[in-house]
Image: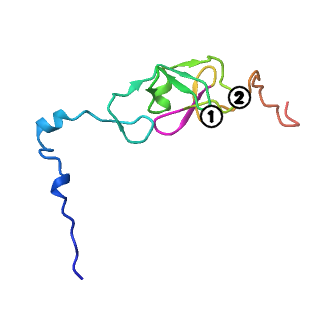
Amino acid sequence: MVAKTHSPDAVLIDVGAGTAAAQAAKPRLYANPNGYGWVTTAPVPATGAIAGNPGTFTPTGGHVASLAGMASLTATPQTAWTTNQHVVLDDGTFAHWQGTIWAAGKSTAVAGATQQPAAPPPGDS
Protein backbone atom coordinates (compact mmCIF):
# COMPACT_ATOMS: atom_id res chain seq x y z
CA MET A 1 0.00 0.00 0.00
CA VAL A 2 1.28 3.45 -0.86
CA ALA A 3 0.76 6.28 1.61
CA LYS A 4 -0.75 9.38 0.08
CA THR A 5 0.21 12.82 1.27
CA HIS A 6 -1.66 16.06 0.90
CA SER A 7 -0.08 19.18 -0.49
CA PRO A 8 -1.86 22.48 0.11
CA ASP A 9 -3.59 23.92 -2.92
CA ALA A 10 -1.53 26.90 -4.05
CA VAL A 11 -4.73 28.83 -4.76
CA LEU A 12 -5.71 28.65 -1.07
CA ILE A 13 -2.38 29.75 0.35
CA ASP A 14 -2.28 33.40 1.49
CA VAL A 15 0.61 34.90 -0.46
CA GLY A 16 3.15 36.43 1.90
CA ALA A 17 1.31 35.17 4.97
CA GLY A 18 4.56 34.95 6.86
CA THR A 19 5.73 38.48 6.15
CA ALA A 20 5.49 41.25 8.72
CA ALA A 21 3.62 43.50 6.29
CA ALA A 22 1.00 40.84 5.57
CA GLN A 23 0.50 40.11 9.26
CA ALA A 24 0.23 43.81 10.16
CA ALA A 25 -2.46 44.30 7.50
CA LYS A 26 -4.75 41.69 9.08
CA PRO A 27 -7.10 42.66 11.91
CA ARG A 28 -6.04 41.47 15.34
CA LEU A 29 -8.20 38.61 16.59
CA TYR A 30 -9.20 37.99 20.20
CA ALA A 31 -10.74 34.88 21.72
CA ASN A 32 -14.49 35.30 21.87
CA PRO A 33 -15.45 35.79 25.55
CA ASN A 34 -18.61 33.76 24.86
CA GLY A 35 -16.38 30.77 24.27
CA TYR A 36 -16.60 30.17 20.53
CA GLY A 37 -14.45 31.51 17.72
CA TRP A 38 -12.74 34.86 17.36
CA VAL A 39 -13.73 38.53 17.49
CA THR A 40 -11.96 41.63 16.19
CA THR A 41 -12.75 43.85 19.18
CA ALA A 42 -10.69 43.71 22.35
CA PRO A 43 -12.41 42.14 25.35
CA VAL A 44 -14.03 44.58 27.78
CA PRO A 45 -13.37 43.99 31.48
CA ALA A 46 -16.60 43.95 33.50
CA THR A 47 -17.19 46.42 36.33
CA GLY A 48 -20.48 44.98 37.56
CA ALA A 49 -22.91 42.07 37.30
CA ILE A 50 -26.71 42.10 37.15
CA ALA A 51 -28.66 39.14 38.56
CA GLY A 52 -30.48 36.93 36.09
CA ASN A 53 -30.74 33.38 34.83
CA PRO A 54 -28.21 33.93 33.40
CA GLY A 55 -27.32 37.46 34.46
CA THR A 56 -25.29 39.99 32.50
CA PHE A 57 -22.13 41.98 33.00
CA THR A 58 -21.75 45.74 32.83
CA PRO A 59 -20.71 47.46 30.70
CA THR A 60 -22.36 45.67 27.77
CA GLY A 61 -19.89 43.16 26.39
CA GLY A 62 -18.01 42.98 29.67
CA HIS A 63 -16.64 39.67 30.83
CA VAL A 64 -14.78 38.04 33.71
CA ALA A 65 -12.33 35.17 33.31
CA SER A 66 -12.98 33.30 36.59
CA LEU A 67 -14.42 33.58 40.10
CA ALA A 68 -11.23 35.27 41.30
CA GLY A 69 -11.92 38.13 38.88
CA MET A 70 -15.34 38.83 40.46
CA ALA A 71 -13.93 40.34 43.69
CA SER A 72 -13.99 43.97 42.51
CA LEU A 73 -17.36 43.84 40.70
CA THR A 74 -20.49 45.62 41.91
CA ALA A 75 -23.52 43.33 42.22
CA THR A 76 -27.01 44.46 41.20
CA PRO A 77 -29.02 44.03 43.33
CA GLN A 78 -26.67 44.25 46.30
CA THR A 79 -28.83 41.86 48.33
CA ALA A 80 -28.32 38.10 47.95
CA TRP A 81 -29.39 36.86 44.55
CA THR A 82 -32.39 34.52 44.48
CA THR A 83 -32.64 30.89 43.36
CA ASN A 84 -30.81 30.08 40.11
CA GLN A 85 -29.58 33.64 39.53
CA HIS A 86 -26.00 33.66 38.27
CA VAL A 87 -23.57 34.98 35.67
CA VAL A 88 -21.52 32.80 33.32
CA LEU A 89 -17.76 33.30 33.53
CA ASP A 90 -15.32 32.93 30.64
CA ASP A 91 -14.07 29.62 32.03
CA GLY A 92 -17.62 28.23 31.70
CA THR A 93 -18.38 28.20 35.44
CA PHE A 94 -21.14 30.14 37.22
CA ALA A 95 -20.97 32.75 39.98
CA HIS A 96 -23.59 34.48 42.15
CA TRP A 97 -23.74 37.23 44.79
CA GLN A 98 -24.49 36.09 48.36
CA GLY A 99 -25.05 39.62 49.67
CA THR A 100 -21.51 40.16 50.93
CA ILE A 101 -19.29 37.98 48.73
CA TRP A 102 -19.18 36.33 45.31
CA ALA A 103 -19.59 32.55 45.35
CA ALA A 104 -19.30 29.75 42.81
CA GLY A 105 -22.38 28.21 41.20
CA LYS A 106 -25.99 29.30 40.88
CA SER A 107 -27.72 30.91 43.85
CA THR A 108 -29.84 28.68 46.04
CA ALA A 109 -31.23 31.54 48.17
CA VAL A 110 -34.99 32.08 48.32
CA ALA A 111 -36.22 35.67 47.99
CA GLY A 112 -36.91 37.25 51.38
CA ALA A 113 -35.62 34.27 53.33
CA THR A 114 -33.01 34.64 56.01
CA GLN A 115 -30.61 31.87 56.83
CA GLN A 116 -31.08 30.39 60.27
CA PRO A 117 -28.36 28.49 62.11
CA ALA A 118 -28.81 24.75 62.03
CA ALA A 119 -30.59 23.31 65.05
CA PRO A 120 -28.38 21.20 67.30
CA PRO A 121 -28.94 17.45 67.13
CA PRO A 122 -31.32 16.02 69.76
CA GLY A 123 -29.62 15.56 73.08
CA ASP A 124 -27.07 18.38 72.54
CA SER A 125 -27.50 21.63 74.38
Give the side of residue 62 with respect to residue 1, left or right: right
Report the front residue among 32 and 120: 32
Residue bearing mark 1? 106
SS at badge 1 = loop
Distance, label 1 to label 2, CA atoms, is: 9 Å
In this picture, which residue range is highlighted in magenta? 88-97
- Residue name at image x 59 percent, y 28 percent: 96
Q: Residue at x 54, y 22 (%)?
A: 49
**Which residue type carries mark 2?**
Ala
Look at the image and tell me in which quarter the N terminus lies.
bottom left
Residue highlighted by disc 2: 109
Which amino acid type is shown beneath numbered disc 1?
Lys
Q: Residue furthest bottom?
A: 1
Q: How far across and how far down the image is residue 24, in percent? A: 17, 33
Residue 91 lies in magenta, yes or no?
Answer: yes
Work out whether residue 35 or residue 15 is closer to the camera in this orientation and state it: 15
- Residue at left 85%, top 34%? 124
Tell me if residue 71 comes above or below residue 88 in the rendering. above
